[in-house]
Image (cartoon, helix red, strand yellow):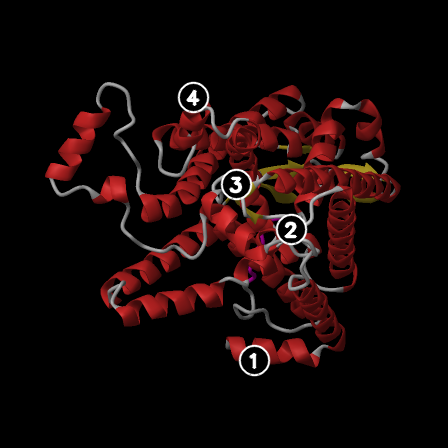
């Protein structure tokens, strides 16, 4: 069965058709709000300012808001406060016994944590929006070229109220999509904000080819690289280590239960895109603080320069943080001791491994090994687009930096330090989000089709696995 027949089957299922149309309508409302600006802002000055500061925290927030912060619309903060609140709640669940207890209360506990996440989102939105408003008042590209046209408490309060309300509305849209639509609403909102720039990027690339700024061969190479990277991401995101779990036979009443064999899937990339987001946020935070507090301090500006794309310190910290947060977040979402204990209570065991403590140690050992591969994969994908755009600067390296830079230049390897001159449409973080969300959504649609006795997108007997 071809994909066109599968697409036709989607519209033959009334409930699935209604869910997809509802999702598209909610995303349309989100994109409509992205064109409503917040009053009191000089948009031309703001665009020029962001071009100078796209590598710091504001560039990261702008990416997750789908360009709304750049245009300072009513959705300027995007969904970033909700992401931050969710991550904070997840971390607190591990260290705060109260949250750990209610997280194990089933549906009631999940609703309480969701409610706390909403409260945290509103609080973070108020703090962030007020801080951004105050900072924009104090920022100007020149004496007569200010970003805020009418500074004062009126602008601060109005901007904070507008952006907080916008974030709360986006949060509501995401929850409605999750409940009444198809796919994860919050992820789809981020997805929509990222892919909306794809047509513009294609048109820009086409214009460069026409003007002679980009050769056709280079454009083809770029397309091949993008397709290869996407295929690699799909391959790794679907990768699993499947551990055989055997359940012993037991008598329950008059029936013999158990005796079955199943698998415990351990994903190669258990932590998803969270480590990349954490690493980007931590590296971007010092740059943001430097621009706010000490924009004229030479030593601080030198540090800020070392934390820009392509610089050795940036690459080293980025790579290290991604690997660290892969292990850190995996330890939060997957507890080998709890899994081993649940298997023991259900009468399950891994062949050759004693139940209980030995099983937990074995799971921790296997998960540690495959997480290392997943961490390297995330780091490579995150750094690849930056390498294509700017290259890896080696001159600032101590002792051997100038010599290595001269050696590469004299031997025709300057592309390593200067990049390939390619305009990559998506950064590493964006690409991971786009591919991952697309896989999850397609997997949910296929599950709906198979449940109603239709073939999936890949034909009968085969299923597309999402990341979860």
Residue count near mark 4 (Cα–Cα under 10 Å), binned few <14, some 14–19, many ≥20:
few
Q: Sequence order check: which comes first, mark 1 or mark 4?
A: 1
Main SS of the magenta part reads: loop
Which label is found at residue 269? 3
Q: Which one is in front in this view, the residue at disc 1 or the one at disc 4?
A: 4
Q: Who is closer to the viewer here, 38 or 149?
A: 149
Residue 195 vertical position relative to residue 46 in the rendered view, above or below:
below
Q: Who is closer to the viewer here, 381 or 100?
A: 381
In whole angstroms, how far apart are the C-alphas of marks 2 and 4? 32 Å
Q: Sequence order check: which comes first, mark 2 or mark 1?
A: 1
Which label is found at residue 183? none
Magenta highlight range: 463-468
Q: Are marks 2 and 4 in contact (CB under 8 Å)?
A: no
Q: Is residue 467 magenta?
A: yes
Which label is found at residue 149? 2
Residue 100 vertical position relative to residue 384 in the rendered view, above or below:
above
SS at mark 1? Answer: helix
In whole angstroms, how far apart are the C-alphas of marks 2 and 3? 47 Å
Residue at point 61% right, 80% down?
8
Q: Which one is in front in this view, the residue at disc 3 or the one at disc 1?
A: 3
Residue count near mark 1 (Cα–Cα under 10 Å), binned few <14, some 14–19, many ≥20:
few
Q: Which one is in front in this view, the residue at disc 2 or the one at disc 3?
A: 2
Q: Which one is in front in this view, the residue at disc 2 or the one at disc 1?
A: 2
Residue at point 79% right, 28% down?
100
Residue matched to label 4: 299
Q: Position of residue 449 (x, y in %)?
A: 66, 70
In whole angstroms, how far apart are the C-alphas of marks 1 and 4? 62 Å
In the rendered structure, the answer to whether residue 19 lies left or right of residue 135 reads right
Q: Position of residue 9 (x, y in %)?
A: 63, 78
Q: Is residue 452 magenta?
A: no
């Amino acid at each position: 069965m071809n994909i066109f027949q599968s697409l036709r089957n989607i519209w033959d299922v009334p409930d699935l058709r209604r869910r997809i149309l509802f999702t598209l309508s909610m995303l349309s409302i989100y994109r409509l709000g992205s064109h409503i600006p917040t009053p009191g802002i000089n948009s031309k000055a703001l665009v020029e300012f962001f071009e100078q500061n796209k590598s710091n925290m504001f560039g990261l927030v702008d990416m997750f808001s789908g360009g709304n912060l750049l245009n300072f619309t009513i959705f300027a903060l995007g969904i970033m406060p909700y992401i931050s609140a969710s991550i904070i709640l997840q971390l607190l669940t591990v260290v705060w016994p109260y949250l750990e207890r209610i997280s194990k209360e089933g549906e009631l506990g999940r609703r309480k944590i969701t409610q706390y996440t909403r409260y945290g989102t509103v609080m973070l939105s108020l703090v962030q929006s007020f801080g951004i408003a105050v900072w924009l008042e104090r920022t100007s590209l020149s004496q007569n070229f200010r970003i805020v046209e009418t500074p004062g408490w009126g602008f601060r309060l109005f901007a904070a109220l507008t952006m907080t309300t916008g974030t709360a509305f986006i949060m509501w849209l995401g929850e409605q999509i999750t409940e009444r639509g198809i796919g994860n609403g919050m992820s789809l909102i981020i997805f929509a904000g990222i892919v909306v720039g794809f047509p513009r990027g294609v048109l820009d690339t086409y214009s460069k080819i026409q003007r002679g700024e980009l050769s056709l061969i280079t454009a083809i190479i770029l397309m091949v690289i993008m397709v290869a990277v996407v295929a690699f991401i799909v391959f790794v995101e679907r990768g699993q280590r499947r551990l055989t779990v055997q359940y012993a036979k037991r008598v329950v009443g008059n029936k013999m239960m158990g005796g079955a064999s199943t698998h415990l899937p351990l994903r190669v990339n258990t932590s998803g895109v969270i480590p990349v987001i954490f690493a980007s946020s931590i590296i971007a935070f010092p740059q943001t603080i430097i621009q706010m507090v000490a924009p004229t301090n030479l030593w601080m500006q030198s540090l800020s320069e070392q934390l820009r794309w392509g610089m050795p310190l940036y690459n080293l910290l980025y790579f290290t943080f991604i690997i660290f947060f892969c292990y850190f977040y995996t330890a939060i979402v997957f507890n080998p001791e709890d899994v081993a204990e649940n298997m023991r209570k259900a009468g399950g065991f891994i062949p050759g491994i004693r139940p209980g403590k030995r099983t937990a140690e074995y799971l921790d050992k296997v998960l540690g090994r495959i997480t290392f591969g997943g961490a390297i994969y995330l780091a490579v994908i995150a750094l690849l687009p930056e390498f294509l755009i700017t290259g890896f600067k080696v001159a600032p390296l101590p002792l051997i930096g100038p010599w290595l830079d001269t050696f590469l230049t004299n031997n025709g390897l300057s592309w390593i330090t200067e990049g390939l001159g390619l305009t990559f449409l998506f950064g590493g973080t964006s690409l991971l989000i786009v591919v991952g969300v697309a896989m999850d959504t397609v997997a949910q649609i296929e599950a709906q089709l198979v449940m109603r006795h239709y073939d999936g997108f890949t034909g009968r007997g085969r299923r597309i696995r999402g990341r979860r």
